[in-house]
Image (spheres, helix red, strand yellow):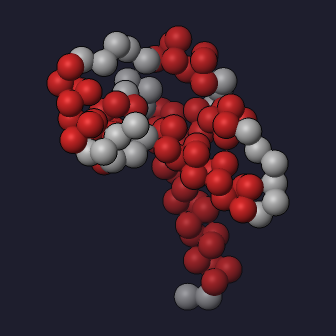
Amino acid sequence: MDDSTRTELEAAAFRRLVEHLRERPEVQNIDLMGLAGFCRNCLSNWYQEAAQARGQEMGKEEAREIIYGMPYAEWKAKHQSEASPEQVAKMNAQGGH
């Protein structure tokens, strides 16, 4: 597989992951952190870092809006629930933020 094709496939898979996460707002970031060791915020941070590494100015909120499909504060107000002690413990066990 050539590099261009690999990049196109990786981009398509990334877009599908973001779409999937947008379709599943009931899955809390803390649950993602507890199970997978990353969440939507991690993904937005990685996106921001990749943009900046290529000379593209991008702030944290801009990157989060790309991943969440809306301003982060709006997503939190609509979808984020209070974390249980069990969720926090699981996240911390994964080395979460």
Q: Quadrant of the C terminus?
A: top left
Q: Position of residue 9 (x, y in %)?
A: 57, 69
Quadrant of res 56 = bottom right
The residue lying furthest to the left in this view is 86
Left or right: 80 with respect to 33? right
Q: How many marks?
A: 0
Instruction: From the viewer's side, name the closer residue of 59 and 23.
Output: 59
79 relative to 3 in the view: left or right: left
Q: Nearer the viewer, residue 60 or 16?
A: 60
Compared with residue 47, is residue 76 higher up or lower down, i.e. above or below? above
Residue displayed at 24% across by 17% down: 84
Q: Quadrant of the N terminus?
A: bottom right
Eyeballing the image, is 9 above or below 26?
Answer: below
Q: Residue at x 60, y 39 (%)?
A: 67
Residue that sits furthest to the bottom in the current view: 1
Q: Position of residue 72 (x, y in %)?
A: 60, 24
